[in-house]
Each structure stands twice: as C-alpha cells, then as structure tokens.
Image: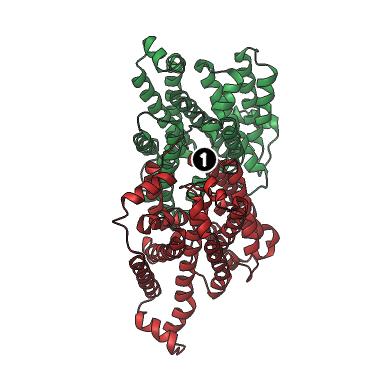
Chain colours: A green, B red
Amino acid sequence: MTAKSKTHSSGARHQNPWFKLYILLAMAIGLTLYSIGVGAIKVPIWETVQTVFGVGSGEFDYIIQQYRMPRIAMAWIVGTGLAVSGTMIQGVIRNPLASPEIIGITAGAGLASAVLLLGMPNVSVQLLPIVSFLGGLIAAVLVYVLAFKRGISPARLALVGIAVSAVFTSGIDYLMTSFPVQLDMALIWLAGSLWARSWEQFMAVAPWILIMFAGCLLMAHKLDVLALGDEQAIGLGIRVERTRLLALAIAVALAGASVAVCGTIGFIGLMAPHMARRLVGGQHHILLPTAALVGTLLVLSADTLGRILSPPVEIPAGIITSIIGGPYFIYLLYRHRTW
Amino acid sequence: MTDTTNSVNTQRVSQRLPYLQAFVISVSLLIIGLLLSTTIGAVEGINAKIFFLSLVQYDGSIEHLIMRTLRMPRAVLGALVGANLAIAGLLMQGITRNPLASPSIFGVNAGASLFVALAFTGVYGAAATDASSLTIPFVGPLGIVPIAFLGAAFGGILVYFLGGVASGRVNPVRLVLAGVAVSTLLASLMKGTIILQNDQTDSIVFWLAGAVDGSDWNDVRTILPWTMVGLGVTVYLAVSLNLLALGEDVAVGLGRNIHVIRAVGGLGIICVAGSAVAVAGPIAFVGLIVPHICRRLIGVDHRVLLILAPLLGATMMVYSDILARFIAYPFESPAGIVTALVGGPYFLYLTQRTRID
C-alpha cells in the first residue's frame, strides 16, 4: 500500500486529484469484495457479490451478512474516523507528528471505553461513543493544558501526549488485570480488532462518524485558510481560536467513536493524512475524502491480512497497522529531523 | 536538562539528605518491605516469626515450605529486578545525558520481550506447547537470558541511532518519539508472534505486564550474576559519568575515552535490563524514575548514586509487588501494573520539568 501511493505521487503529481480519488475508491470497493470472500471459509467472488445484494444461493447468507459484512462496514467507518481525525489534528496544530494516539486521545477514549465495557457490562452499547468521546476529550484537554507554555511547541506536545498516554494506558492495564474474567475479550479489543463486530455496534457509531465527517467537509475552506498561518487567517476574516477548537473537538469525537468500537488501531491517524497529502496536496475539500479512503484501505488491508495469514487464528488489525506504522513513523521522524 | 538538574540541586543543597541517613532509611525500608512481602498473601498465618524460624530452624511444615520456596524467592527476585532496572536507568541517563532515558523508553524492554517471545514460539517451540513454560518465562539456568540480551541490544541500538543519540545531539523528545515508535513496532511483532503460535492469553498478558510471582530460586540464580556485573560496570564508570555530566568536551579533555564509556555502559545496560526482562517481563518506569528520585535525595555524584539507586529500585519493586496483591485480591496482579500507575504520573511530571529545544 505504501509503495503504491508513493509511485502515484512521484509519477503523476499534476494529474487531476479527483481522478486519484476515484481510483482509491475503486481500490477500496475491490478490496471490500475480496475481503468478504476470504477467511476461514472461502466464498467465490460472484457468489459474494450476489449474496451482498441478497440474490445469492443462500448458502453463505449467514456468514456474509451477519459475520463479514458488519466487520468490513466497520473497517470503512473506523478507517474514515481515524484518518479524518488525524487530518484535522495535523491541519490545526500544524505538527507533522500529531495524531490521535500521539496527543493522547486514543488512550483516553480507550480508558473510558474500558471502564464502561469491563465495569458496567450491562450498559447499552449506544452509550459507548459518548463515553469514549468524553474520555478522549479529557485526555486532549489535559495534554493541551500541560503542553501550553507560551504557545504549543510540536516537541512539547508530543512529549506530553506520550506521557498522558502512558498514564491512561496504565489505567487500562490496571482495569484489565482487575477484571480477569473478561480478559480475553479485553485483550483483543485493546490490540485493535474488527473481530466479531456486529451491526448493532456499527449502527451505534456510524451516524456519529458520518455526521462529523460532513462537518469536516463544511469546514474545509476555513481549514485551508488556517493553514496559511494565524495572521493571514485573521486577516481573511476567520475566527482562528474558535475554528481551531471546533476542529479539535470534531477530531476528538471521530477518534473517540472509532476507538469505542474497535479499540486502538494504531498509526492510521498518523499515516493516512501524510499519504493523502502526498497524493492530492493540502486542499482540505479533496484531502479529507482522500485521507478517509486511504484510512479505509489501510484498515481493510490490515484486517484482511490478519485473517488470511494463518486461519483460523486471527491477528488483530491493530497489530498489523502498528508493524507498518512504526517504521513509517520512524521515516517521518527522519524526514522532519530539523527540530 | 543536566544543567537544570544541577542548578536545582545546588539550590536545594541545604535540604538534601546526608548520605548515611539516606542509606539507613532506604535499607530499613527495603528490609521492612521484604518482611511484609514474605508475610502478606492469600495463605493466612504466616508471620515474621515464621520468616526467621524457617531461616534458622527449618522444620518442613507447610508454613515453612511456603516461606522458603514461594515467598522468599519472590521477594528476593523482586528486589533484584528492581535493582537491575534502576542500574540500567542510571547508566542510560548518565551516558546519554538525557533525563528521559530508561529501559522502557529506549526500546530495550520491548526488544528483549520480542526475542524471548520468539524463542518460546520458535527455538523453544516444543516448550511453548507446555502450559507451565509460559507462566514462568524461563527455560534453563542460562536458556533464555542470552536471547533476552540479544533482544535488549537490538531494541536499544535501534533507538540509539534513530533517536539521534549517536550523532551526539541531546534531544529528549526525539529520543522518546523514536523509542515509542520502535517499542510499538517490536511489541506488535511480539503480540503477532504470540497470537499466531498459541492462545494462552492469560499467562502472556501477565508476563507482558511484568510480574515476579510464581518465581523460584532458579530465577534468583539466573539474575543475580548479572546484577553483580551491572554493579561492577557502574563502579567502573562512576567517575567517568560524573565528568560526562559536565559535558562531553570536559570528559574528553580530562582523558576519558567516550567510546569506551559508551561501549562498557551499553554492555552493562544490556546485562541488567535483559536479565530483568528474562525473569520478570518488561517492567516499566522503575528505571526511569528511581535515578531521578535518587538525584533529588542525595545529589548527582554517581559514586553515591550507584549504591542508593539499586537500593531504592529494589524497594520500589518490592512494595509494588506487595500492592499488586491487593488490586484484585485474592487473585494476583502483575507488579508492573503498580509501577506503571505510579510511574506514569511521575513521567508526566518530568516532562513538565524537562527543558525542550
């Protein structure tokens, strides 16, 4: 995936960005169909298409409609949520290394979700995105306040974010060992997995993420102006602080909702925006949908790979994205070595 | 940062503890901790009297048996692991002159755990199918330790170069970022390996969180020689580290060989941190915060720090292990949870004090 996007950007920088967007969309749809077909039980591609549209032989109805489709729909939603969240954060903070996990949102949302999942297992799943959002919000506010010393320097933000994440993560560890009964579930959830996601969980978060995504697109123009720098933006009539806070709040909500249902699928919020920016440039009205598709592709490929490596054992998607994302982060660190 | 530490410490010079007092307090805390650790647990009726009696006139009763084969090795092992981690942190912070350097941040813990996990699933594949071999991550008196050393060296060297330490720049944030990225990568590889090979999630989660329960005298015998090696290295480097704290130029000007310091120190770190991971899993934050606490208590002289840091590290680990027993009583929790709960906020506090750019 990384290799593909690189050849794209270097080979055809002047191509129409919308064309690239459509190619990404076609790739995502193709991968979706492939992903529905593979796994412990293989389904032929034509049978897959027919079953998805409800005109199949009925043999694979249950496995596809109740087992594979929800998790793949979830991959779309979560990939979009994390990637758009990362794009908003990087755009607003103007920090190439900022992402939901670096600034602590993921860990905060994860802790809040863990409290709800392990401590109150009977509470409705509908509450999960809200609780998760609150957790992410607390973490983000904490990081912002602690990192603020006459402005926010990228380095300090990253450092404080990592420290706050460490605190919240130790809280998650604490909860996990205090409730050993649900340990297996919690472990899989924590590693970031789409395993056994249901339509119910999908419906709990999908509306949130779609509404937030629409909100981001409406803000695209303001974000472009913000990218010019604070003085320019003020001169062009943008209320900088308000826009920035609103964008961050949306980013927290997006990441929080994603974490709530799938745990911490690492590095998507960091990688996808960078890849999308290299593909289509920095105009947010095209950058945001591209990032969403790149994020979807990353999550989908990680999930598919995790299922086909050695069935019936599944490797959580989060583990695979971290194996790709770790080196990518190191590469970013190397590219931005000036500070 | 070293400058800030120095200035902070010179300001507080009057409030600092006299050396003797610091040692007496930490030794007594450690002894009380060891006593508590051997007398608190799910089995009732084991008290300090049994602790002493089992030492001087062992009568083979069940209480004495529990004391000698379960409680004592656990307490001693905890103390040794804590001492090892503190030595590793002290050496790292001294050599890199980076206040945030520590085994977990330097990728040393993650590297050692990855290699240990690989060993269980690959080299020792047959052993991994046996349930008991995973609850005690230890194959033979020397079986897993060299592998942990290799892993520790692997993770440490990666972060060393990526974090820009090799090029001589002291940028705490860069080091932390590189360390986090490398650790995440190595940890993900390890989890992937474990999930692919078997599904004993319970024991693995436990080991990954860092625990000293279920240990025996064999574990103690495994780690003890390396603790000694680590102490030896610290003694050998103490004066050099003091000079290095004044600046690399000063140390070179006064006839110290930077490369020798780094190489010897690096080997020492690999020995202490690797052996600690091999017997107890990756335990976070002890190596980071103990040297800081020690410097606040008695100042920046490594000749004194090298005695106090292992003592305090051992104390912290022993008390963490005691507290861990109450988290989900009567079930055991990993001691690493407690060190993380205490260490996380302290790390946050350190980031507030660290000067950046």
**Circle count:** 1
Secondary-structure class at tag 1: helix
B300 or A14, nearer to the observer = B300
Q: On what subunit does the disc labeled 1 rest? A: B
Where on the picture, by quarter, is residue A31?
top right
Q: Check the image and report above or below for A62 versus B62.
A: above
Q: Position of residue A184 (x, y in %)?
A: 50, 53
Q: Which residue is mark 1?
A: B177
Residue B338 visible, this angle: yes
Q: Position of residue B48 (x, y in %)?
A: 35, 80
Q: Residue at x 55, y 70 (%)?
A: B224
Q: Residue furthest front?
A: B254
A308 or A268, nearer to the observer = A268
Q: Quadrant of the C terminus of chain B?
A: top left
Q: Position of residue A114 (x, y in %)?
A: 41, 46
Q: Residue at x 32, y 58 (%)?
A: B16
Q: Check the image and report above or below for B161 versus B277.
A: above
Horizontal side, residue B281 vs residue B312: left or right: right
Residue type highlighted by circle 1: Leu
* Crowdedness near tag 1: few (<14), some (14–19) or many (≥20) residues, C-alpha within 10 Å: many
Where on the picture, by quarter, is residue A60?
top right
Q: Check the image and report above or below for A230 versus B198.
A: above
Residue A60 visible, this angle: no
